[in-house]
């Protein structure tokens, strides 16, 4: 399908769908029922009321009290004031949130909390626009990838739930998207400029990196990516000593500006928490007593159980496991999402293989984008695994900093399996699997297998739409998949979140 079939107004439709759903999540999700929301709220409130940043100290993570208040669904007679374990976080988001808090100081709590949640919603909308621009510029002529990536990010239920809460996640994703966009534009434009890069040329990157350092540690994956991109970009233009000096100059200016922006915060933390604990993570680890450690869980349950829990819980909580990980969806919905994920993964892998085999059809800027975005995803996944080596935190939301490359892979995969070449083997594979599940379900008397067979049959119908290669049928299949995700957002909110968590 040509790029002309997907005009720019499609992103406006996606953005409108996201805003409608996210605003409803912000309004209807009961207070404090977004992970860590009380601690983030208390940080912003302290800053607004006292004019200085809080200090993380012993007692800010009251484990027993936190478990009790979560179990009772945050009743009004139990204060969230003691929950302050996010006080070590970098300050940028909380400065903005404190401004919103100050604007609504005299308003009821529900109004003030909703206003602060809507700040995150606006940040999420900005990230969607940057993601759309990034993919559209990196893959010209493949506009289905740009709107598909944006639609996946916009309608992923768990992502909406997180970006409709009081936390610094949405701003972290926004900063990372802005940095990746700048880096990819730099790689695309640099060959046309043989002159050395000046300070003002590196200034935007330094500013973005510095603001990222002041947002959240999940943005820190941008540092090695930026270093490698500068090495790549400057190293292609100069020779010998000039190449080395150009690379060092890029590193010096961009990282120097970033460090200058964050330096005061690092010095403050070193003086407050002692030693080289410039991020406050040492203090955080010291006070979070009672939090389940991976070594303890491993000793009690074994490696196989740990891997199963990591895979299953990560998958479920990536798509939707709400509240404080206590509200799960119906198992049949997870089965449907697993089929959709498998379909997209199969198509995405096939799409990538075809691109690599046909290098003549892969534009250099597309190759650069795949490398940079792939590196971003890899570093985010490694950071997630590293965190889980210390604590049992099998939460798929920690993968959201890599949502642009994940969304790109999802969009590419669905597009591939609805192509004439991709629909045929996909449909044959699904048909065989559906038949096997039906036979097994009947012979074993297992109704769950029959349900899975029905889901596989519905997925088969999706693949069959691309069999004949009709652009109209293909467009309908893709639009139906993302519209289905948007409908799932409402099912999650009013079918699971509100009934389970409302007082």
Image (cartoon, grey):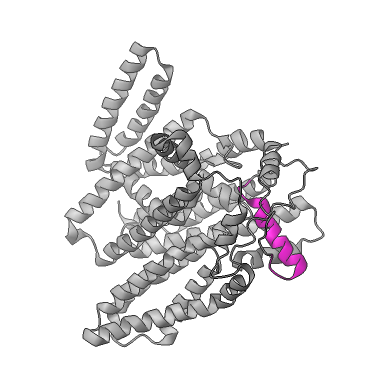
Q: What residue is drawn where x is 34% and y is 43%?
A: 344
Q: Main secondary structure of the magenta part?
A: helix
Please name whichever residue, 279 or 459, is drawn nearer the observer in this view of the structure: 279
Q: Which residues are magenta?
A: 34-54
| Number of numbered markers | 0
Residue 485 visible in the displayed image: no
Q: Residue 143 placed where, x, y %? A: 36, 57
Image-quadrant location for residue 467? top left
- Is any atom of residue 409 visible in this view? yes
Task: Tell me residue 345's x, y (percent).
Answer: 33, 43
Q: Residue at x 61, y 42 (%)?
A: 323
Vertically, is 424 above or below 386?
above
Q: Is residue 296 above or below residue 192?
A: above
- Tell me if residue 137 comes above or below residue 503 in the rendering: below
Spot occupied by residue 160 in the image (x, y as percentages of width and height):
55, 48
Magenta stretch contains residue 49? yes
Judged left or right of residue 350, residue 373 is right
Q: Position of residue 420 (x, y in %)?
A: 24, 41
Using the image as rendered, state which of residue 55 and residue 109 is in the foreground. Answer: 55
- Residue lying farthest right? 106
Q: Vertical placement of 337 versus 188: above or below?
A: above
Question: Which quadrant: the C terminus?
Answer: top right
For image coordinates 43% across by 66% down, the residue present is 222
Of residues 93 and 133, the one nearer the viewer is 93
> Is 444 one of the magenta-colored residues?
no
Frontmost residue, 323 versus 283: 283
| Residue 187: quadrant of the picture | bottom left
């Amino acid at each position: 399908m040509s790029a002309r079939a997907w005009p720019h107004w499609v992103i406006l439709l996606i953005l409108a769908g996201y805003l409608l759903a996210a605003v409803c999540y912000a309004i209807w999700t009961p207070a404090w029922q977004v992970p860590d929301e009380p601690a983030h709220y208390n940080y912003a409130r302290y800053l607004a009321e006292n004019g200085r940043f809080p200090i993380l100290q012993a007692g800010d993570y009251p484990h027993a009290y936190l478990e009790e208040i979560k179990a009772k669904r945050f009743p009004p007679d139990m204060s969230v004031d003691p929950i302050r374990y996010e006080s070590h976080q970098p300050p940028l988001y909380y400065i903005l949130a404190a401004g919103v808090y100050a604007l609504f100081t005299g308003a009821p709590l529900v109004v003030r909390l909703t206003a602060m949640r809507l700040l995150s919603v606006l940040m999420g909308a900005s990230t969607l626009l940057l993601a759309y621009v990034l993919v559209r510029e990196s893959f010209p002529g493949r506009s289905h990838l740009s709107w598909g990536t944006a639609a996946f990010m916009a309608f992923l239920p768990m992502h909406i739930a997180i970006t409709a809460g009081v936390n610094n996640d949405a701003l972290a994703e926004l900063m990372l998207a802005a940095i990746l966009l700048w880096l990819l534009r730099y790689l695309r434009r640099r060959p046309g400029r043989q002159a050395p890069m000046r300070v003002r040329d590196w200034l935007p990157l330094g500013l973005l990196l510095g603001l990222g350092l002041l947002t959240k540690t999940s943005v820190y994956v941008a540092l090695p990516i930026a270093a490698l991109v500068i090495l790549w970009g400057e190293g292609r233009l100069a020779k010998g000593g000039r190449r080395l000096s150009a690379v060092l100059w890029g590193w010096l200016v961009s990282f120097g500006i970033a460090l200058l922006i964050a330096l005061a915060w690092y010095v403050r933390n070193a003086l407050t928490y002692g030693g080289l604990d410039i991020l406050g993570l040492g203090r955080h680890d010291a006070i979070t007593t009672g939090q389940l450690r991976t070594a303890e869980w491993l000793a009690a349950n074994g490696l196989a159980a740990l891997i199963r829990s990591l895979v299953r819980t990560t998958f479920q909580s990536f798509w939707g496991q709400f509240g404080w990980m206590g509200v799960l969806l119906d198992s049949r919905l997870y089965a449907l999402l697993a089929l959709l994920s498998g379909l997209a993964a199969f198509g995405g892998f096939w799409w990538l293989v075809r691109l690599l085999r046909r290098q003549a059809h892969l534009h250099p800027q597309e190759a650069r984008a795949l490398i940079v975005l792939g590196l971003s995803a890899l570093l985010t996944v490694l950071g997630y695994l590293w965190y889980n080596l210390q604590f049992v935190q099998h939460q798929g939301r920690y993968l959201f900093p890599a949502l642009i490359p994940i969304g790109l892979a999802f969009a590419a995969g669905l597009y591939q399996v609805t192509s004439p070449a991709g629909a045929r083997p996909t449909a044959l594979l699904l048909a065989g699997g559906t038949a096997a599940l039906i036979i097994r379900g009947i012979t074993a008397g297992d109704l769950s297998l029959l349900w899975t067979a029905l889901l596989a049959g519905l997925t088969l119908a999706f693949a069959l739409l691309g069999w004949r290669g009709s652009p109209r049928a293909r467009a309908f299949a893709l639009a139906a998949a993302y519209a289905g995700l948007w409908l799932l957002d409402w099912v999650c909110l009013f079918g699971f979140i509100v009934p389970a968590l409302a007082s």
